[in-house]
Image (cartoon, helix red, strand yellow):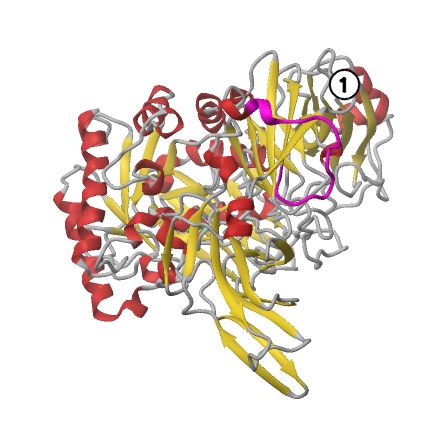
Amino acid sequence: MWPDLIRKAKEGGLDAIETYVFWNAHEPLRRQYDFTGNLDLIRFLKTIQDEGLYSVLRIGPYVCAEWNYGGFPVWLHNQPGIEIRTANSVYMDEMQNFTTLIVDMVKQEKLFASQGGPIILAQIENEYGNVISSYGDAGKAYMNWCANMAESLDIGIPWIMCQENDAPQPIINTCNGWYCDQFTPNNENSPKMWTENWTGWFKSWGGKDPFRTAEDLAFAVARFFQNGGTFQNYYMYHGGTNFGRTAGGPYITTSYDYDAPLNEFGSLNQPKYGHLKELHGILHSIEKTITYGNISSIDFGNSVYATIYQLNDTSSCFFGNTNTTTDATVTYQGVDYQVPAWSVSILPDCKNVVYNTAKVNTQTSVMVKKINEAEDEPASLKWSWRPQVIDDTVVLGKGQVSASQLIDQKVTNDVSDYFWYMTSVNLDKDDPIWTDDMSLRVNGTGHVVHAFVNGEYLGSQWASYGIFNYVFEKKVKFNPGNNQLTLLSATIGLQNYGARFDLIDTGLPGPIEIIGKKGDESIIKDLSKHKWSYKVGLNGLDNELVYADKKFASQWQSENLPINKMMTWYKTTFKAPLGEDPVVVDMQGLGKGLAWVNGNSLGRYWPSFIAEDGCSTKPCDYRGSYDNSKCVKNCGQPTQRWYHVPRSFMKEDDNELVLFEEFGGNPSLVNFQTIRPGSVCGSAYENRDMELSCYGRVISDIKFASFGDSQGTCGSFEKGSCEATNDALSIIQNACVGKESCTVPATESVFGSTNCGKGVSKRLLVEAVC
Ligand code: GAL
C-alpha cells in the first residue's frame, strides 16, 4: 500500500512523511534484525524520496504509538541489570546500539538531507518531558545523554525531541497535541514546530469511535500558522491497522484508523482530507511571506485578532476568532469581514478571504460495505474446525519450566499472547480449609484468565475497559487428594505509555488463593509460592495451523461444527472480492481471538466487546476545544466488527481464513465485504465550485440539492428558510448523473436569486448516490 498512500499524501498537499522506527519489529531477538518485507525501512524511505517528498525520521527508539510495549522489544526488559528510559548503562548501550544501527543504515543509503536525501529531521526519545520528573536526577542525566549520543552520530540535520522542555541545545523541542498555537520552544532561535497534530484519536476495546471534525482540525492548523508556526505534522495522516500482535495497550484495538485524513483502508476520509488539502494549497501559496515576513497583530478583543505577515510589498493576513460561540466581524482597512466562531480566515493578499476553516467546500463521502460478489462465492462460508488440544497442559499440568513463584508473563519475551500457569494442590478432608464452600481466587493483570480445575473448565475473567487488573473468584468442588489447577493468561497488548510503564505486571502476579468459608470465617491458602509449571503459547500456533500446507492440515473436520465453544480453530476458503475496493471481513458473531488470511495475521479480533455508553444524541459541534471524548460514535456496538484484509494478503483464486476462537463464537455470520463510497455530499459556499466525485464510479442519482441556507449532515439535509428560485435538483441532475464527477458553480446566476437575508452564508448542498 505504501506507494498509493504516499501518493495520496502528496496529492493532499503534504511535503513530508513522518515515521517512527519500531525497535521491537526490527530487533525481535537480541542482535537478530529484520528489515525484510513490510519492515524494509530503507525501501519505505526511498518510496517517499521517489515521490519527491521529504521525510522525518523518529527513531525513538521508545515510540509510544499505541504500539506493543511502546516499541521496546520485551527481551530488553529481561536483560540483567537493566532499567529502561533512565541513566542505566545496560539500557543506554542497547539504545545506542539500535539508534546507531538505524543511523548507519540510513547514512549508507545517503538518505539524510545533508547527503542529498529526503530526511530533514530526526527524533531521539519521545515525550520524555511528560515523565522525566519521576526519574529524578537520573532522568535528567539520561535526557542529556540522549542528546549527546544523538549529536555524536553526526547526521548533518537537526535532532528534535517532542514534549521535552529541557531539551539541550542544539536539540529542538517540539509540541504534540490537538492544538499547539500557544507553544513556544525553549530556545528563542528554535523554530516553532508541531510533531503530532492529533487528527482524531485511537480506540481501545470497549471504547468509542473518535471523531474530530474537519473544521476543528483545519482551525488548529490555521491557528498554528497564524501564531508563527513553521512545521506541522499530522498524527496520524494514515493510521492503518495494527496487524499481528503489534497493538499496544493494554487494550488498543486492531484498527488504528484514528479518524485520520486517509482512513484505515487508505481511502480518502472526506471532507477531512479535502478540506485540509485546500488549506495546504493556500499555506503553500503564502509560504514565503509567512516564513520570512515581519509579523504584527491587531487584537479586536473577545478572542478575535488579526495577524499580518509582511514581506516587501506583499502581505498576507489571518483573521482568527477563538470564541466558542460568538461570530465576529473584523474591520480591516475599512472593509468588514465575517469570521465565524472558532475559525480562522486566510486572506493571502489581506483583501480577499480565500479560506475559512469553518466553511467546508469539499464533499463528504459516506462509505458503505458491499457483500463479496466474487463469482461462485456461496452465500455463506463453509467451515471446518478442530479443537485446540490442551489436554497435556490442562489435565496433566505439563509445562516447559517450573518455579516456586508466580512469574511475570514478560519473561517469555512476549512471543505469544498466551501463557499457562499450572500447579497441583493436595487437599485433605482433614485440612482446616476443607469445607463445602471453597473457591479459587486469582489476582490478574493478564488481561484475560481462563481457569481449569482437574481438567474441567471453571470460568474466565477479563479486565474491563480502562481498569487492567481484575480478581477472578469462583466456587470450586475440589477432590480430596491431588487437584490440578491450570490458568491460562492472555495479554491484549502490553502497556506503551507512562513513567516506568515497562515494569507494570503482566500475567498473573497473584496472589492466587484457595478460600474455604466456614460461617463467618474464611481460611485462605496462598498458592503463590507453590511449585508452578509454565508453558508459553498454544499448540495450534506452534504447529502452524494457520498455514494451509502444513502437516496438520489434514486434521480438520467439517461435521458437527461447534458453536460457542471456547478454544476452537475454524477454517474456511473464500474468493477474493472482485475489483480494487478495500476488503474487510465481518466478524459479527464471534467472541475473541486471532485471525489469519493465507497465513498473514489480521490481528486480534473481539467483536463481542461492546463499546461503552456515552455518545451524545446532539449533532457534533466543531466549536470549542476538541478532546477524545467529544463527538464520539459507535456506543453500544461491537468495538470493532470489521477487520481489514489488505489485497496484498490475498491471491486471485482461493484464499484461506483461519480463526482461533478463544472465547467461543458462531462463525456462520462471518463474511467478506468491500468498502466504497455509497453516497457523496457536495458542499460549496456562494461563489465557490461544488465538486462531486464517486471516485471512478458513476453518479447514479441525486437525492437532494439546494442553494440557500439548508442545514444538516450528509444523508439528512433539510431545507432552510431561504432558497434560490431555480430548481436546484434538476440542475444538478443534468450536470452530474451518469458522470464520474462534476463541478457546478454555487452562484445565483446558476440557481437564481434567493430571498436569503443579509448575513446568511448561502451554500449549495447536494446529496448524490454513487
Ligand atoms: C503521543 C505519542 C504518540 C501517540 C499519541 C497518541 O503522546 O507521542 O506516539 O501515542 O500520543 O496517539
Q: Tell me which amino acid carries mark 1.
A: Pro
In this view of the protein, which residue sits in the foreground, 275 or 529?
A: 529
460 above or below 576? Answer: below
Horizontal and vertical percent position of residue 712: 77, 43
For the record, the magenta segment spans: 553-568
In this view of the protein, which residue sits in the foreground, 226 or 43?
A: 43
Q: Quadrant of the C terminus?
A: top right
Within the image, what quadrant is residue 456 found in?
bottom right
The residue that appears at 33% across and 52% down in the rendered structure is: 126
Horizontal and vertical percent position of residue 428: 56, 74
Horizontal and vertical percent position of residue 434: 60, 77
In the structure shown, which secondary structural element does the residue marked by tag 1 occupy?
A: loop
In the image, residue 130 lies in the stretch drawn in magenta: no
745 above or below 237? Answer: above
Q: Pointer 1: what residue?
A: 378
The residue that appears at 66% across and 67% down in the rendered structure is: 477
355 above or below 65? Answer: above
Give the main secondary structure, helix, strand or loop, of the magenta stretch. Answer: loop
Mark 1, Cα crowd under 10 Å, few <14 / some 14-19 / many 20+, is few
Q: How many marks?
A: 1
Horizontal and vertical percent position of residue 288: 35, 35
Within the image, what quadrant is residue 369 found in?
top right
The residue that appears at 73% across and 13% down in the rendered structure is: 739
In the image, residue 560 lies in the stretch drawn in magenta: yes
Asked whether the viewer can see residue 128, the reply is yes
Within the image, what quadrant is residue 42 found in?
top left
Asked whether the viewer can see residue 181, the reply is no
In this view of the protein, which residue sits in the foreground, 308 or 280?
A: 280
In this view of the protein, which residue sits in the foreground, 248 or 268?
A: 248
